[in-house]
Image (cartoon, grey):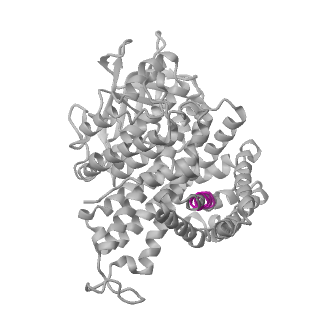
Amino acid sequence: MPIYRAPVDDVQFLINDVFHLDRYANLPGFADASADVVAAILGEAAKFCEEELTPLNRVGDAQGCTRHDDGSVSTPAGFPEAFRKLAAGGWIGISAPVEFGGQGLPMILTQAVNEFVSSANVAFAMYHALTQGAIFALISHGTPEQKALYLPKMIAGEWTGTMNLTEPHCGTDLGLIRSRAAKQADGSFRISGTKIFISAGEHDLAANIVHLVLARIEGAPEGTRGLSLFVVPKVLPNADGTLGARNAVSCGAIEHKMGIHGNATCVMNYDGATGWLVGEENRGLPAMFTMMNEARLGVGVQGLALSEVAYQNAVAYAKERLQGRALGGARAKDKSADPIIVHPDVRRTLLTIKSFNEAARALVIWTALASDLHRRSDDEKIRQAADDHMGLLTPVIKGVLTDQGFANTVMAQQIFGGHGYIVEHGMEQFVRDARITMIYEGANGIQALDLVGRKLPKDGGRALQAFLAEVQGFIKEHGADAAMKPFVEPLGRATGRLQQATMWFMSNALGRPEHAGAGAYDYMHLFGLVALGYMWCRMARAAQEKLERGADGAAERMQAKLITGRFFMERMLPKTQAQLARIEAGADSVMQLPDESF
């Protein structure tokens, strides 16, 4: 059975030594997140994930979910009990407001714990992660009455949440949505339509499911400008929070999928179901994007999480599997062969995954900190800069972390050879589970177009300029430090390529948008490598400072950190040169071939 150990030490290094959580003690909730509290939370989360959720991962994959004749759905054996423990532990509401029953702690902790849960059992993780997204959508856009009614139950895990966008005829183009909302005399709406691919749409983990549904009010404009957001509970709640009558919403079918079998991905039918408007009429898409952006960051975390658990199992196998001899001479002379971890190509593969995982984790933590600054700071400039950061980095985190996360699960599977293709080792499940992360919450090609077409030019390029200024400022500050040269010099070259690609778009794509479309995917990955390289520079500096202070017993880990970072700079960042070349090749060869010649 696959193993998993939560990377608690690495998260603590990021929180304490790289991003210095203690420097933000003036913000609400941060003073309560002392180093001891953070260590206790991460330790308990690790124990729960390792002992409770990891053993259920194979169970969920093998059993899947079952829809019954009455439309109800049973989750795999052990899931309901595990969800009750997760809810009782307060893991859903780590960063939710205290006034609604949450702990009010920084989002950094929520994202760290969500990585652990997703590594242990990604299909299970989706039930509470979607609930967290729905919680923050209601916090941002719900009425006081909606907040009082729904949030305490959802934060406590008594009720869960979903997001309902996709319909059989439309996915990315939400302007084609046909679901309708008819206004009633009491101010409620009757919601009618069919939604597909609804994760956690029906299950037996909680007494109620709170669906957030995009629909068009009768008479509203066509396209995305006419969409509104509604809260549509599975069971209608009474004013005191008790459950009343069943609503006219049902699961019509469960999708048969390549992976994430333990999550109920449903076709949901709304047959005049009662719902209530969230936010303003015809302003549903901005409200839903609050949840979608949370979900996109969460899916990026899933890509990292699956890469991490696949890596851990590949390392364990590489240390045990005997095959051939080391090129420099036998290492395990008392055995018939050496473990395969002595072979350069195996080490290259493992370091490729490891160097990505550690930088990706830092990128997630950095962006989670921006989320906290945006929500909690009373300084408008800080709030704006944090919002710019999240807007710019969200498509990068979603697209790059899931693309590379999937690639890493395949590389980790390769370490096992033929055994990786066999179910008993669990590696093929990681590959299957990771594949969906590149597709849902906006396919990665769409993330690239969002980055290039919307995020770069927004506010005159303010977010990109701030990002580049920070990276270049770090390079300038540490450029004369001999110990940092192996890190800042490659980052400087890669950052220059990012600037060159941006200028090429400005010069060539304004008159011909196809140039931007053809180069967007490479640009997203070029940007991602620069961002990950910047994270390695910050981690390298923190590791060096820790070693200079005596390392507090972590000298071996810090030395390993520096070696891994150097590998990333030497082996991963040079890809930016090829990406720049592809961007500057333009759209001609992409667009000239006649459709019938494909």
Confirm whether the magenta stretch covers residue 535: yes
Q: Is the residue 71 above or below the residue 150 in the image?
A: below
Closest to the observer, 9 or 428: 9
* Quarter in which the N terminus is drawn: bottom left
Looking at the image, can residue 416 be seen? no
| Residue lying farthest to the right in this orientation | 507
Confirm whether the magenta stretch covers residue 543: yes
Q: Quadrant of residue 156?
A: top left
Residue 565 x/y as whole percent:
56, 66
Residue at 75 percent of width and 60 percent of height: 476
Q: Is the residue 188 above or below the residue 413 in the image?
A: above
**Drawn side of residue 73 relative to residue 479, left or right:** left
Q: Is the residue 503 above or below the residue 180 in the image?
A: below
| Residue lying farthest to the bottom in this orientation | 329
Closest to the observer, 149 or 104: 104
**Drawn side of residue 533 relative to residue 54, left or right:** right
Closest to the observer, 476 or 503: 476
| Residue lying farthest to the front in this orientation | 550
Closest to the observer, 141 or 118: 118
Looking at the image, can residue 352 be seen? yes
Residue 504 x/y as whole percent:
75, 61
Residue 2 x/y as whole percent:
28, 59
Q: Main secondary structure of the magenta part?
A: helix
Residue at 49 percent of width and 34 percent of height: 105
Question: What's the magenta region?
Answer: 530-544
**Drawn side of residue 549 relative to residue 263, left or right:** right
